[in-house]
Amino acid sequence: MRVLRNGLDGVQDGTEFDLVVIGAGGAGLSAAVFAAIDGAKVLVVERTEFVGGTTAWSAGTTWVPGTHHAAAVNPGDNLAAVTTYLNHAVGAQAPAALREAFLKHGGDAVAKIEAYSSMKYRPYPKHPDYISDLPGSTLNGRALEPLPFDGRFLGDLFSLLRPPIPEFTVLGGMMVDRTDINHLLSMTQSWASLKHALSILVRHLRDRLTHARGTRLVMGNALVGRLLHSLSQHAHATLALKTSVDALERDASGRVVAVRLSSATGKARVVAKHGVVLASGGFNRDPVLRSQKLPGIPAEWSPAAPGHTGEALTLARGLGAVEGQGAQSPALWAPVSLRQRPDGSTAVFPHFVMDRAKPGMITVNQAGERFVNESTSYHLFALGMQAAQQAVPAYMVADAKALRQYGMGMVRPGGKGLAPFLADGYLTEAASLQELADKLGISAQGLAQSVADNNTFAQTGVDTQFQRGETAYQHNIGDAAAGGRNPNLGAISEGPYYAVKLYPGDIGAAQGLQTNEHAQILNAQGQVIESLYAVGNDMNSIMGGVYPAPGITIGPGLVFAYLAVLHALSQ
């Protein structure tokens, strides 16, 4: 692979490529790898200095039902059940034909990329669909995760991989996934956990002798690392970093045939013989589109990567492309907490599964009242924040026992090292609930009543207000080992008491360009814009802004990258 680290230096006007891919996130790299596997000459254009986009910051979960991996953990699952589930979860909020194409070709896409590249997956033993009380849902087999990857195989390309969010690493850049965290927390109780913990700690110490961070890659960094390594094996692939797209050109028939690019080192018009694939990540960093689609939600609350500026979407709309309509929400969401780093930047921490759903924690609004099921999916939780009164910011409240056991956002489990978080106001501590409410500026009476109600629910095991802990998904992100009647409920009774402010953060775009089952972009009349494709978050979500399962952006991104390349190269 030819790598242009500083733009278009050396790229001449009129250079021909079989396929031009705009964006080097998970979907864009997947499209490039599929094209390279099929022998195509492919150019990947990335406007930032890193590859990976938001995928590199994610858990890397890839939801693709019907793969050969499913039988290992859930041999009874089938695509008819998946169709039933999605019909109930998504319904008319997105075209059923796109879901059908996704399910029909998902197994083929995964099989091909594993057979001909460094991309390797495994099914997580238990990873339930998020709305697990709907017909057709299942506990496992549909969500795949990338195998850990040794970043040293990338050689000099390792520096191109977008580093993980610092607050998701430990010991100065050591990545850990859910399995690692469980072993690290249990290393004093289990020989197997101690062995695992020591192995990754020793590896990290060795890494730091020669690298700026750990090279043992997990989650989204492993996924992107594997894709980058796969693409690097193809001499007919080119990666241009720090490069922007200025225009998409069509011929007299209306077919997209060329792309005008610019960078600090030059400009070039490149020919796209078989097509252009838009995979730039969506609209989330476009200030105009944000103000239209996400009013009242500052960009500073978004944990999405910085490259999602919406420029490619604007160019496509200039050719007649239209956005999908009818979705539950134009974005996908998670509650986030904010903290200023020493360098002045803002850390945005998504609260996915490690704290808010656990026993001994509740979330209240400014009246001190609960307003949402704390154990629902992060998407529904953040939508609940926006729908409720006085819930932005909201306050996640825990007692000392829960803080020690689970941590709170950027505060690690164990209850140690709290001073910096207390000093800068990220964490609020108080000897009593009254004092905590006073420090937060919320209703003390409301908070006291919410805690009293929670403690009653913990005793009975039944949350009569929000039905917390009543589904398999909720149980999975609770803590059955806590010994309560409900794995998501526990008493809040051991002072001191703590709180962290939460905000609704958009983690990705759900509203993108309308496409057909080949990922071809459509105009307002439903006609194809020839040789122009959209995948990832540039493509309107096939889930209609619903979040039915883990990995429902990365999974469709992979499958429609496969379908887009298959169609483009056949033309």
Image (cartoon, helix red, strand yellow):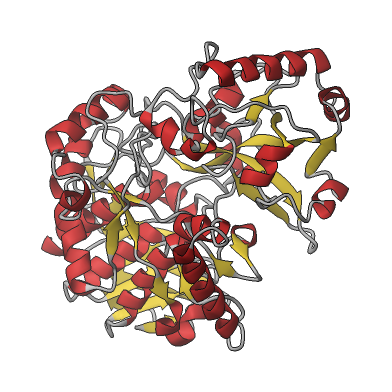
Q: Quadrant of residue 189?
A: bottom right
Q: Is residue 110 above or below residue 48?
A: above
Q: Quadrant of residue 439?
A: top right
Residue in the foreground of this view, choosing between 484 and 418: 484
Left or right? Give the position of 179 relative to 402. Answer: left
Q: Is residue 212 above or below residue 76?
A: below
Circle count = 0
Q: Position of residue 270 (x, y in %)?
A: 35, 72
Quadrant assignment for the N terminus: bottom left
Q: Quadrant of residue 166?
A: bottom right
Left or right? Give the position of 501 relative to 511. Answer: right
Quadrant assignment for the C terminus: bottom left
Decide if residue 11 is in sight here.
no
Residue in the foreground of this view, choosing between 89 and 248: 89
Left or right? Give the position of 2 relative to 243. Answer: left
Q: Position of residue 42 (x, y in %)?
A: 29, 73
Residue in the foreground of this view, choosing between 386 and 165: 165
Q: Position of residue 518 (x, y in %)?
A: 19, 48
x 35%, y 44%: residue: 127
Q: Is residue 482 above or below residue 389?
A: below
x 25%, y 32%: residue: 525
Decide if residue 22 is in sight here.
yes
Q: Position of residue 397 (x, y in %)?
A: 70, 31
x 42%, y 22%: residue: 470
Q: Is residue 23 above or below residue 4?
A: above
Left or right? Give the position of 372 relative to 225. Answer: right
